[in-house]
Amino acid sequence: MWVFMEFTGTVEIIFSKVLSEDMKKEIEKIVEYLNRDYLKRGTRDPKEAAHINSYTFKDSEITLEIETGSKIRIDEAALRIKNVLSATLGSRYKIGIRGVILRNPKIVLNSRIGVSLKIPLIKSIVGDDNRTSIELVDLDENDLKKPLFLRLVRLIEDKEQRAKWGGKSEHWILIKKSDKKIIKAFTEDPNDILERIGWMKRMSIGQWLYTPPLTHMLNALKRLFIDEVVKPLGFEEAIFPKMYPLEVGLKTGHLKGVVNSMVFASLPRSYDISEFEELIDLMYVLNEVPPEELQKYLRSPSYFLCFAQCEPFYWFFENEVLDDSSLPIKWYDQSGPSYRWESGGIHGIERVIEFHRVEVVWLGKPDDVTRIRNELLERYEYFMDRVLDIEWRMAWVTPWFYEQSGTIQESIENIIEVNRPGTIDFEAWLPYRGEREDNKNWIEIGNISIHGTKFTEPFRIKHNKGETLWTGCSGFGSERWLIVLLAQKGFDTENWPRKYIEYIRTTPFPKSLSTVTYPKTRDGKELLSKIVDLFKW
């Protein structure tokens, strides 16, 4: 792993008037003080500090050539210099500072970096096996006040670690699996059957309308999960919004990690309908919506649609101070859809753009967060193994950013210590895809995570006595769980789990739609009739 050698650059400070000889002499004393003391504060090794190598005067400006180490970055050093000059000269000579510019800033590393950086801030990257020089564009004072150098450093570190991780977002290690339960597999794709019999209809790419029978089945499975897994552990229901400001996604990290899978929302440029007259007239005449024209009337995206469903939980507690009497906090949300752009991977209702789930979230001290996760694990296993009686497995899927931070530890025997930040996936076999021995024939149906301080730190969620707070979350995707149940059990209700049948029967099963043109094919209508006969209790 590389370490920083130095930052270099030229700092130009522009004063409100021409510098007198007395001012210049005072500045010489200030520079001496800065090099001797103030630019070294916060460091132990002089190599980590900042140093002014030379400086020149011209009219109302001073130009300083500086180099810094990794502790006192060049942006911080420039602001330290500016603040000392402003305080000392301002009180003594009634002179102000009109601007600060950092010219030709450069980051020099002691090895080659193997990742690409495509940022407008970067002017050039030059290097060999032993050294890399990253030159940036000139920066003004507003830029310097942002920790751009720190973020750039972290970006390089993260991309290097991700590359060393093997290009994968996570590593997969089997923890536990069920016995083989299916003797004679149901080999048809339930997605195809549900569409053929008209219980669901595709509205758009990865988006479906579920008719009353399928809705009834999904809701029954969701209620069963909540009653068997969530409520026994004391989780209480909340309703989360499903459209979030971009700032929330920046703090959760989704915008920096999965922006290619997110769906964004834009607001109209105006609320005045008269400003849309030209667009309305055009749509009236063309009888279509020209996307390019519509875009002219929209603001830039300012929101993203629900991606992980847990984001509002962290936002709610932002800047809040919690005490022991309120902890741990355990909520769940089942109020609406989530959205993920899956591009070419869409299939049926098991991989869609719009889907529904129960999101379980909790917040507390590390021991409590870990205990709750373990209690949920036990309930999940009971739910999969005893209630639904499906073939399942659990896997530890270490996200690369947890691994590189040192929060995940793996023993010599390749056994993960799971009572730490990380994620456990729940997967189930889809017989219609092929043999259970092939990993491609399994699908993730849920997960459970301990985040550590991944969210409590950026959202500044505090404990009144300074103790560390962690969060955890777990997602139950209704569509995938139902597809797994149908893929393993088929549509004959005699093979369905007893408890699920009880929840299905709680209210009368809805009537299936059968009309002149729907379902679309004769085969679909005949298949619908056969399946409806199986649902007669």
Image: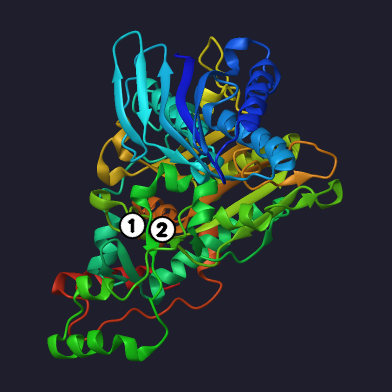
Residue 262, image x and y in percent?
Answer: 38, 54
Q: Is residue 69 left or right of residue 191?
A: right
Instruction: Give the camera-side residue of 338 and 33.
Output: 33
Identity, as a three-letter code, of the amino acid under mark 2: Glu
Instruction: In the rendered view, tell whether residue 358 sits above or below residue 97.
Output: below
Whether residue 419 is visible to the viewer of this picture, yes or no, is no
The picture places residue 115, in percent across and down from the top left corner, at 32, 25
Q: Which of the 4 quarters of the picture holds residue 80?
A: top right
Within the image, what quadrant is residue 375 found in? top right
Q: Nearer the viewer, residue 70 or 537?
A: 70
Q: Amino acid at mark 1?
A: Val
Q: Looking at the image, which residue is at 84% across and 45% down? A: 464
Q: Secondary structure at mark 1?
A: loop
Assign the C terminus to one quadrant of the image.
Answer: bottom left
Q: Label 2, secondary structure: give it.
A: helix
Q: Which mark is residue 178?
A: none
**Where residue 43 appears, x then y in whole percent?**
67, 17
Q: If you read the primary sequence from the N terminus, does the residue marked by circle 2 or circle 1 appear first?
A: 1
- The way the protein has been coloured in the rendering is rainbow
Q: Residues within 10 Å of mark 2 (few under 14, many from 20)?
A: many
* Crowd class of label 1 (few under 14; some 14 to 19; many from 20; radius 10 Å): many
* Residue 8, horizontal then vertical, whole percent: 46, 22
Quote the CA–CA distance across marks 2 and 1.
Answer: 9 Å
Instruction: Depth check: give the residue in front, 449 or 434.
Output: 449
Tell me the tag on residue 479: 2
Kindly identify which residue carries mark 1. Answer: 352
For the point 40% across and 27% down, which residue is it? 162
Residues at marks 2 and 1 touching, judged by CB atoms closer than 8 Å: yes
